[in-house]
Image (spheres, rainbow, N blue to C red):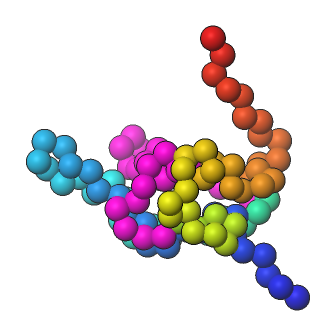
Amino acid sequence: MSEEPAAVRLEQICKEYSRGGIRVLALQDITLEVQRGEFCAFIGPSGCGKSTLLNLIAGLDRPTSGHLILEGRSAAGLTSVTCSTAVEPPLAPTTTHVGAQR
């Protein structure tokens, strides 16, 4: 019996920013695995890295180091469009994506 790869897997993810010459370590050595159909919530105080982590998973930003793997495939080199649609079906099947309206 073959085991399905995790829908989302992060291996030792780090993210650094530079603000006015000062190094800001937003995420350090994050390792996480979310299986298809699992529900995962990131909770914590403002500024702890929740949005940064979600932006990395969605492909809107790139980690400084570490590996992001979607459905067993490396997300390195994927665009934000392919990264955000790489996991099918969605992790939360009842969630819908609504585009911006004018």
Does residue 91 appear left or right of residue 57 in this picture? right
Give yes or no for residue 49 being in the magenta stretch. yes
Residue in the image at 11% along x and 48% along y? 21
Q: Position of residue 91 (x, y in %)?
A: 74, 53
**Vertical order, 52 against 98 (above or below):** below
Q: Is residue 5 in sight in this rendering?
A: yes
Specify whether 55 is left or right of 17: right
Q: Residue at x 68, y 55 (%)?
A: 86
Residue farthest right in this picture: 1
Q: Residue at point 33% right, 54% down?
A: 26
Report the front residue among 83 and 22. 83
Please provide percent x and percent y for residue 24: 23, 52
Image quadrant in which you'd find residue 23:
bottom left
Looking at this rendering, what residue extends furthest in the bottom direction? 1
Q: Nearer the viewer, residue 81 or 7?
A: 81
From the viewer's side, name the closer residue of 83 and 18: 83
Q: For the C terminus, give its image quadrant.
A: top right
Whether residue 42 is visible: no
Magenta-colored span: 38-67
Q: Residue at x 42, y 55 (%)?
A: 62
Q: Dominant secondary structure of the magenta stretch?
A: loop
> How many callouts does the rendering have?
0
Where on the picture, by quarter, is residue 69? bottom right
Q: Quadrant of the N terminus?
A: bottom right
Q: Nearer the viewer, residue 60 or 27?
A: 60
Residue 11 sits above or below residue 81 on the image = below
Where residue 45 appears, as percent x and y from the top left, is 41, 44
Q: Is residue 90 left or right of residue 51?
A: right
Confirm whether the magenta stretch covers residue 51.
yes
Where in the figure is residue 2, as x and y percent of width and height?
83, 85
On screen, 35 above or below 90? below
| Position of residue 47 in the picture relative to residue 75 (left or right) | left
